[in-house]
Image (tube, helix red, strand yellow):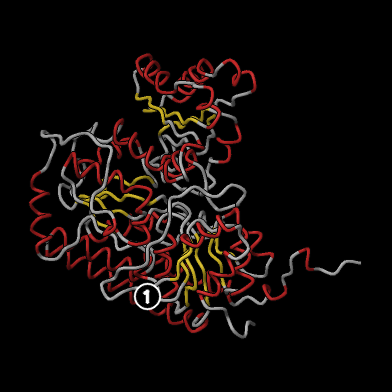
């Protein structure tokens, strides 16, 4: 039991104090004590900056963001990693993305790991012929609708042209074949890979199918939901009950056909802001589809997001049906929330996970009446922390407005609702929703992780698989929020109850008081 926990400012000084002066100066700008002004502005934080050499952090690579995050959950595209087998194997199902093919015979390539398995001789003499052979073999075995190719670090270094191979094989096979120049070293973090994936999805798939299937109104896309542990299944069921027609999810439980048809939706909802906001921007520019920020993590966030969606369509029957679903579910959730909050009230947590998760999951901890001491992202930009007010203009990679497919009716509806105070293209960011005198840390290092635990001994530490075991050896439970280990789903109403239950088990288990790291044990 810690008698007096250091303040956030004291903790910051302790974290940067052991670094060389130049590194300490930079880290001092990346570690911020939060302060929310009356106008909701917050301190500026340095982000999207290369990690200092020699410091071990949570970050992943550009390839991981492109293939592992954005394309990984798609079940009927053959995703071929062009590179050594380690890259392909590591990015294969490590996030526990789930999918539900409509029939046992439907395509589902997620259980396969496709790689060209480059060896030393290919690094010396080139691997394009091997890549062509791999694309041909994949086609001969599965006859998929599309094949995508992902470049890893060695491919960029030796100069293999995956796009030329893709064009040749597309012409030869008569299916959609396209590539991603997502070499791991290419960006500051996996965020660059998200951007590359978004651009190529938009360029090569979105807009290929204009047929309007299903119901003709209340059509929506969900962007930035990756169906980890079955999260998307919970959201999909809610949409059906309320009356929304889900056209496409980017990219949990997704298909090639849904991407190709996504421009027929009336509204885009952005869940994970950093990984997918580029697609939302490009679809708005080309097709006129507005986007709003949503959050289906936490019961309160889910209710707010459903109401936001229903209000957009201005249909009383839809709004009434949505309210009925919310009322039914919230009554069940509130009973469970009170039960678990009685056991978790006053406990502490820290969250260092990517996407919008370090923001969204704070809502769940509020519902459990727990206090978040510190939070941060691995690959965020300033707008993810401080809100989109810091970027009055956004540079995007998109085609010009498509006059034939642009929908002025959506633009006029957006203009009307905006005049009534309805917010589009808006995200307040994580920091305005955090308490004053909490600590915000971008790109946290292994040293800082251990030091935080040493100083604050939080009741639960939320992070990823790489950090999990070190945290647990220090006697603190780690809630792994990259793939939930074996937990989840944690989205929507039932997911919130699952999270309450799992956190209660973790923070109230006596076993963590008995845990000691191997180096703390007495030796003979």
Foreground of the two, 237 or 310: 310
Foreground of the two, 94 or 110: 94
* Residue at image point 65% right, 22% down: 120
Q: Is residue 227 left or right of residue 487?
A: left
Determine crowd level at label 1: few under 14, some 14-19, many 20+ residues with C-alpha closer than 10 A.
Answer: few
Above-or-below relation of 154 to 523 = above
Q: Is residue 127 left or right of residue 321?
A: right
Picture mark count: 1
Above-or-below relation of 159 to 259 = above
Q: Is residue 486 visible?
A: no
* Residue at image point 26% right, 63% down: 306
**Furthest residue toward right:** 524
The C terminus sits in image quarter: bottom right
Q: Estimate the x, y position of residue 16 in percent, counting from the top left.
A: 57, 64
Q: Estimate the x, y position of residue 343 in percent, counting from the top left.
A: 52, 82
Q: Estimate the x, y position of residue 286 in percent, counting from the top left.
A: 18, 39
Q: Is residue 26 left or right of residue 2?
A: left
Indicate the secondary structure of the residue bearing disc 1: helix
Q: Is residue 172 visible?
A: yes
Instruction: Tell me where residue 76 sits by quadrant.
Output: top left
The N terminus sits in image quarter: bottom right
Above-or-below relation of 138 to 347 = above
Instruction: Tell me where residue 413 sits by quadrant.
Output: bottom left
* Residue at image point 19% right, 50% down: 290
Above-or-below relation of 145 to 396 = above
* Residue at image point 30% right, 51% down: 222
Q: Estimate the x, y position of residue 519 in percent, counting from the top left.
A: 78, 64
Q: Which residue is mark 1?
A: 332
């Amino acid at each position: 039991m810690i008698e007096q926990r250091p303040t956030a400012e004291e903790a910051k000084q302790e974290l940067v104090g052991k670094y060389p002066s130049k590194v300490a100066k930079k880290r001092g700008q990346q570690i911020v004590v939060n302060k929310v002004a009356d106008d909701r502005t917050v301190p500026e934080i340095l982000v999207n900056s290369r990690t200092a050499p020699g410091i071990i952090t949570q970050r992943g690579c550009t390839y991981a963001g492109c293939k592992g995050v954005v394309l990984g959950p798609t079940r009927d595209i053959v995703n071929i990693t062009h590179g050594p087998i380690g890259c392909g194997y590591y990015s294969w199902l490590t996030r526990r993305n789930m999918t539900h093919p409509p029939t046992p015979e439907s395509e589902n390539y997620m259980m396969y790991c496709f790689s060209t398995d480059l060896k030393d001789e290919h690094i010396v003499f080139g691997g394009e012929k091997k890549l062509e052979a791999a694309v041909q073999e994949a086609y001969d075995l599965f006859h998929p609708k599309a094949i995508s190719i992902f470049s890893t670090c060695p491919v960029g270094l030796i100069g293999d042209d995956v796009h030329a191979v893709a064009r040749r094989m597309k012409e030869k096979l008569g299916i959609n074949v396209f590539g991603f120049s997502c070499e791991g070293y290419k960006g500051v973090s996996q965020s660059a890979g998200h951007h590359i994936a978004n651009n190529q999805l938009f360029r090569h798939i979105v807009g290929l199918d204009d047929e309007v299937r299903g119901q003709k109104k209340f059509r929506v896309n969900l962007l930035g939901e990756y169906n980890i542990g079955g999260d998307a299944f919970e959201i999909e069921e809610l949409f059906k009950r309320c009356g929304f027609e889900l056209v496409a999810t980017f990219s949990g439980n997704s298909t090639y056909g849904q991407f190709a048809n996504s421009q027929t939706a009336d509204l885009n909802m952005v869940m994970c802001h950093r990984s997918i906001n580029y697609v939302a921007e490009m679809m708005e520019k080309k097709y006129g589809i507005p986007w709003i920020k949503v959050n289906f993590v936490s019961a309160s966030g889910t209710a707010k997001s459903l109401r936001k969606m229903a209000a957009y369509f201005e249909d009383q029957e839809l709004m009434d049906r949505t309210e009925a679903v919310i009322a039914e579910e919230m009554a069940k959730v509130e009973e469970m929330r009170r039960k678990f909050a009685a056991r978790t009230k006053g406990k502490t947590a820290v969250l260092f996970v990517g996407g919008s998760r370090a923001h969204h999951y704070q809502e769940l901890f509020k519902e459990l009446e727990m206090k978040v001491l510190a939070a941060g992202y691995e690959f965020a930009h300033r707008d993810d922390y401080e809100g989109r007010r810091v970027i009055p203009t956004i540079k995007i990679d998109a085609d010009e407005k498509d006059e034939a497919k642009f929908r002025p009716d959506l633009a006029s509806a957006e203009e009307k609702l905006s005049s009534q105070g309805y917010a589009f293209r808006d995200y307040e960011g994580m920091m305005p929703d955090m308490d004053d005198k909490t600590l915000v840390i971008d790109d946290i290092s292994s040293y800082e992780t251990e030091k935080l635990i040493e100083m604050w001994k939080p009741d639960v530490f939320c992070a990823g698989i790489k950090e999990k075991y070190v945290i647990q050896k220090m006697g603190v439970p780690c809630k792994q929020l990259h793939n939930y280990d074996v937990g989840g789903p944690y989205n929507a109403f039932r997911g919130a109850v699952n999270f309450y239950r799992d956190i209660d088990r973790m923070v109230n288990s006596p076993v963590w008081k008995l845990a000691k790291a191997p180096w703390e044990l007495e030796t003979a």
